Amino acid sequence: MSAPVAPVIALSHGGGPLPVLGDKNHESIVYSLKNRVPKILRLGTPLAPRAIVLVTAHWSTSEPTISSSDHHDLYYDYYGFPSESYSLQYAASGDPLLAREIKSLLDAQGLTGRLDPKRGWDHGVFIPMLLINPAADIPIVQVSVLQSEDPEQHLRMGAALARLREKNVAIIGSGFASLHNLMEMRSLACGSRAAVQDFKALSDEWNDALTSAATTESKGDRWDALRAWRKLPHVNRMHPPAAGEHFMPLLVCAGAAGDGEKAGMYKDVYSGVNILTYYWGGERVD
């Protein structure tokens, strides 16, 4: 059997620890994390990835930073949730050799990678992974996004990481690309049906434009479209200016997709609006 090319998935991780606490508003996202993502990753088969590089929206740094220990404690970077959310555990190992390889790949792209053996894995890592792979038997290396929110640099990060796919290392971007505006999200949670429908109309226009950009098969055209993501319709309602960290993992993933590689997509519902996940490679899901 030839070595598989590992998939790339830009998934939506949900709000804080709520996906693992049984929150009703996360039922769709939880279903996908438990069922769709494991299928894309081919978990439980001989083609499962040997490791996962996880780019998290909850770690913004001035330069690409890489978790580099063989073990990382969990960093409970959320506040005001039930006590059980602060005793969650995820016992996957790190991979120091892979971390050093990632640094070398980033350096070769002109991006100065930095190793960090101390910072814990934030909830952008352990919350989705508790649902995706509760066995915790695949090593993980966490990678930051950039405070600059420079789309070119994030696309180039993805291009650097793409080399790992041929070594059966999967790339997961953990963010909330369709919507991360806390004010709008609170309004959706307590708004009238009419208000939710009005916002959904805007969200659908945004999602359509984003999907056209993210799923373009030509690498050059895809990069051009995503470099200009701040010009997409209603963008500032979905991701406020200078607060686009939850969009950055998608840029990294799109940069890791191949030239001519066809994207897959699935849809979840959160607070009455559609939340989209994009992926390249792996098994196709409905």
Image (cartoon, grey):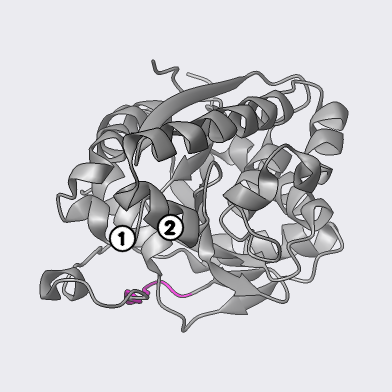
Task: Answer with left or right where residue 39 lies relative to residue 9.
Answer: left
Task: Answer with left or right where residue 155 lies relative to residue 45.
Answer: right
Q: Decide if residue 133 is in sight here.
A: no
Q: CA distance from mark 2 to mark 1?
A: 7 Å
Instruction: Please tell me which residue is depicted at 80% across the width and 43% down the height of the picture.
Output: 231
The three-letter code of the residue at mark 2 reads Ile
Residue 272 drawn above or below residue 92: above
Pointer 2 residue:
140
Q: Decide if residue 246 is in sight here.
A: yes
Q: Position of residue 18 (x, y in %)?
A: 24, 56
The three-letter code of the residue at mark 1 reads Ala
Pointer 1 residue:
92
Q: Which residues are magenta?
A: 69-75
**Front one among 10 and 192:** 192
The image quadrant that residue 153 belongs to is: bottom right
Asked if disc 2 and disc 1 are in contact, CB closer than 8 Å, the reply is: yes
* Residue 114 shown in magenta: no
